[in-house]
Amino acid sequence: MRNTGEGVSLLFVLRAALFAALASTAVFCAEPAKESTANSPKVTAVIQITHDGISKANLVSDESNLYVTESPAFGHLVTKLSLRNAERVVISGAFPDVQALDISADRTKLLVSRLQGAAGENEFWTLPINAGLPQRLADSTGRYATWSPDNKRLAFVKGSTIFLANADGSAARELYTANGSVFSPRFSPDGKHIRFSIGNTVQNTTSIWEVGINGSHSHAVLEGWEHASAACCGNWTANGAYYIFQVTQTSPSNLTTLWAIADPNSSGKATPLQLTKGPISFGNALPSRDNRRVWALGVQPTGEAVRYDPGQQKFIPLLSGVSATDLDYSADGKWVTYISVPDGVLWRCKADGTEKLQLTSPPERAALPHWSPLGDRIAYVSFRPDKPSQIYLVSLSGGDAQAILPEKRGQIDANWSSDGTRIMFGYLHDAEDLNIEILDLKSRKTNVVPGSRNLFSPRWSPDGRYVAALSPDFTKVLLFDYKTNKWSVWLSEPAGGVSYPVWSADSKYIYFDDLVSDEESIRRIKVGENRAERVFKLEGIERYPGPFGLWSGRMGDGSWMFVRDRSTQEVYQLTLELP
C-alpha cells in the first residue's frame, strides 16, 4: 500500500518534484533533449554557482544578484548571491524566518512572506535590499504572492483562492478559486494574465492553469498533453515568447526536467519542448531578462535511514555514511538489504554495516526488497528501461537475478510465504486487470487470490491466514480470510491514510503510517475491529520523499524505521538558445 499523496503538504510535493541523480561535474555541455531540433529552444551549458550544501528554495534576481531563500539548521533566511563572484550576504538577518517571493520593478525591494502562525496564513512584507525598514503589505495573508510587471498589482494565494490587490496589498478581492491547492502564481509579461499551478493531493498530480486578471477565461494551459498532470512551477521569459516550467517523473526514480512552451498567441497551438533530461534534476526555474539564461535549483538527494526510539523520542541512524531507503532486515537480524539513494541500486550488508555487497547495477533500478524467511534470497521490484516493473530474486551471495514471472503487467509488493516456497504479489495501480497472485517457486504455477480483482498492494499475514489489500479508490483496506474464503471491509480511511502497512509478528494487527490525519502518526488496527488506534505521533523529522512516497518499515523487534531527508539544493545557471 503506497502513499497516494492525500493530505501531504505542498512543500512535500515540490520537494519530491526536485529529487534525482546529480551530476558530478560542475560545468558541462548539456545533452540535447530528444524533442529538440535545430530551431527549438535548448540548453547549451550548465554552471554550478553554489557549493555550500545548504537547503534552498525560491530564486529572485535583479540580474546582478540572486536572492535565495535558504533553510539552514533552523528557520529560513534570504541571502544575496553575487552573480559576478558568488559572494553571499544575508540580508534578512534582522527580519527572521522569511522567504523571498518577488522583486519590485525598480529592483530596490523584495516581496517576502513571513513564515509564522497557521499554514497558509503568512504575512506579506516588503524587504528593502540596501537600506530602509521592512513594511507590511496591508493585512493580506497567504502562502504565495507576486507583483505585476508594472508593480501596480499584487496577486496572492490563500489555499485554493487567488486574490488580486493593489501593490501595497490594499483593496484585495477574490479573483479565482481552483479545485485544489494553488501555488507558484506569475503574471504574464503584459500583465493581462496570471499563470499558476494547482496541486491535487488526492490524485498526487499538479497542473498549470491560467486566468485573466478580470477573472475570465480560466483554463488548463497544457490540456491533452501527455505530461500535463506532472507539470508545475513556471516562469515566462522577459519577452513573453516562452514559458519555462518543470515536469516531474516519480517512477522508477524521481527526476524533474525543464520544458519550454512558446506563447500560443504568436505561434498558434504550441507543443512543449524539453530543455533538460537529466542527470541533474532542476526546478524553480527563473529566466534572466536578456532571455539567454535560466537560474534553477539542482538537487543532490541524500537519505539517512533512522530507527525511532520511543523511550528517548529520538531518531537513531542505522547505517553510518550510507544514503539509503527501503531497508529490510533478515529474520535473524544479522543482515540488512537496502536501496541506495539516489542511484536505486540494491545492496546487502551485515547489520553493523560490514560485508557490503552490491547486488544490482544501473540502468536497472531496484525498490522494496524483502528477505526470504531463510535469509538466503532477496525478492525485489526491478525497473528496467522500456520494460514493466517485475519482481526478481537474487541470492545473498549475489550473481544473476531472475524474474519470478516475466509478463507485460507491472508487478510490485512481493510477500514471502512463511516457509519461503511461495511469493504473493500485486500490480501497479495503473496496470490493466488488477488482481493479487501467488507463485509457487518450485512448480512455477500461479493462483489468483479469490475475489481479488481490482485490488492491489497486498500484505500477507505471517501465519498465512489473512491478506490485506487496497480498494481501487484508495479509501478502503479490505481483509481476506482464508478460513472463510471471503473478503470484508476492514478499515475506511481518506485516500493515502494507510501507507506502508506491515503485519505484527502474531498476525493480530496491521501497523501503518498515517500521512493524512491531523497529526502524522503510526497507527494500527486489530483483526476483528474496524477502528484504528494511534501508536505514536511522528514529529521531529523531515522525511525523504522516495519514488513511492515517504517510506517506513518495521524491524523484527518492533522498532520503526524511516528515512530522514539530508538532501541539499545548489544554484545552477543554464545557458539557453531561444529562437
Image: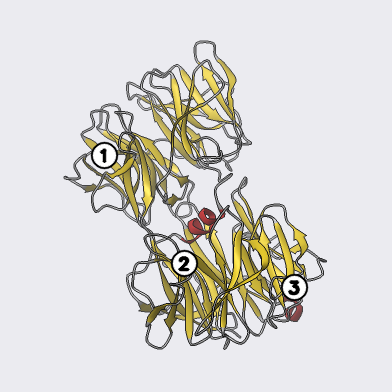
Image coordinates for residue 415, horizontal then vertical, percent:
41, 30
In the rendered image, the quadrant that contains the C terminus is bottom right
Looking at the rendered image, the disc whose residue lies closer to the viewer, 1 or 2, is 2
Label 1 crowd bin: few (<14), some (14–19), many (20+), radius 10 Å = many
Residue 263 appears in which quarter of the rendering?
Answer: bottom right
Q: Give amino acid for label 2.
A: Pro
Q: Which residue is mark 2?
A: 96
Mark 1 lies on a secondary structure that is strand
Q: Which residue is mark 1?
A: 336
Distance from disc 3 to disc 1, alpha carbons, whole Å, reads 54 Å
Foreground residue among 169 and 470 = 169
Foreground residue among 98 and 67 = 98
Looking at the rendered image, the disc whose residue lies closer to the viewer, 3 or 2, is 2
The mark that comes first in sequence, 3 or 1, is 3
Q: Which residue is mark 3?
A: 193
Image coordinates for residue 193, horizontal then vertical, percent:
74, 73
State the residue at coordinates (73%, 78%).
191
Label 2 crowd bin: few (<14), some (14–19), many (20+), radius 10 Å = some
